[in-house]
Image (cartoon, rainbow, N blue to C red):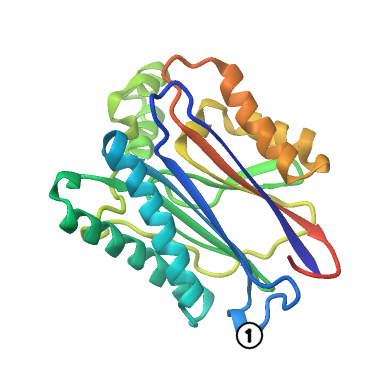
Amino acid sequence: MLQFRHARRASQGRRKYQEDAAAIWQCDASSGPSSDNGGVAFAAVLADGMGGHAGGALASETVCAGFVEAFRACESAVGERLKVALLAANAAIARAVAGNPRLRGMGATLVGVAFGAQGAEWVSVGDSPLYLVRRGEIARLNEDHSLTPMLDQLVADGRLSPDQAKVDPRRHYLRSAVSGEELDLIDVSRRPLTLESGDVMIVASDGIHTLGDEAIARLVATHASDGADATAAALIDAVDRAGDTMQDNTTVVVIAVEDGPTIL
């Protein structure tokens, strides 16, 4: 039976304040992924806020708290449970803005992922990535709801140079965010992703893009045997050492999949 070890690390980067947030929900370790908890052993949510010092930080915290509360209370199948939690997070933002109109315009990205006997399922809005690293190979699992894919396609079509695309101010424009309004784009896993012992999943804010995918995979390969906490620390340390003068907040939740007698 597989078990899931997790760790969370964050860096403020070169920003004056932290707008990322993350939260964890974990079932009773003695029960495992039973029908009492909908077959889920563990769930994580990460949000990258927008809206300035107060608004962005409040948005990410509100999104994470609303998501976890709804996920815990919902008794539906895992995929539906994730969508219900997302909608609850969006409604929480709407209530916060209604209570304080000065917060209008605040919002956040969201990645929520649940782990259980059937594997991993997720829901996401925005550009925060969810990665799977397996046997040294890395893959992004969720969609990117920024304009980055459009710019990358322009590069592929020869209409924009790689250097131009890298510094294009539109790269981080979001096409969808959790803002209390109707959600324009939602990415939902179509079926549970079967997991293997040795897999590492990373939920991150977009500050992680300071590292390329290959660098992330190398860091995981180097540190995974030391555990989830060592891997999360290595990722954040690498971002800080890169020395990007415009470095955004970076938060990672690392989930290491291991063989074990129980699911924690």
Residue drawn 74% across and 37% down?
A: 230
Q: Residues within 10 Å of mark 1 (few under 14, many from 20)?
A: few
Q: Residue 47, percent across and down?
A: 43, 48
Q: How many marks?
A: 1
Residue drawn 31% across and 24% down?
A: 159
Any part of residue 109 in sight:
no
**Residue labelled with disc 1:** 35
Query: For the residue marked with disc 1, what is the amino acid?
Result: Ser
Q: Of 216 and 32, which appears nearest the observer?
A: 32
- Give SS at disc 1: helix
Residue drawn 82% across and 40% down?
A: 226
Q: Is residue 205 above or below residue 35?
A: above
Q: Residue 10, percent across and down?
A: 55, 36
In the picture, measured across the screen, residue 24 lies left or right of residue 61, that is right
Residue drawn 78% across and 65% down?
A: 2
Q: Residue 49, percent across and down?
A: 36, 42
Any part of residue 188 in sight:
yes
Residue lying farthest front? 99
In the picture, measured across the screen, residue 146 lies left or right of residue 244, that is left
In the picture, measured across the screen, residue 35 lies left or right of residue 206, that is right
Q: Residue 164, percent across and down?
A: 35, 18
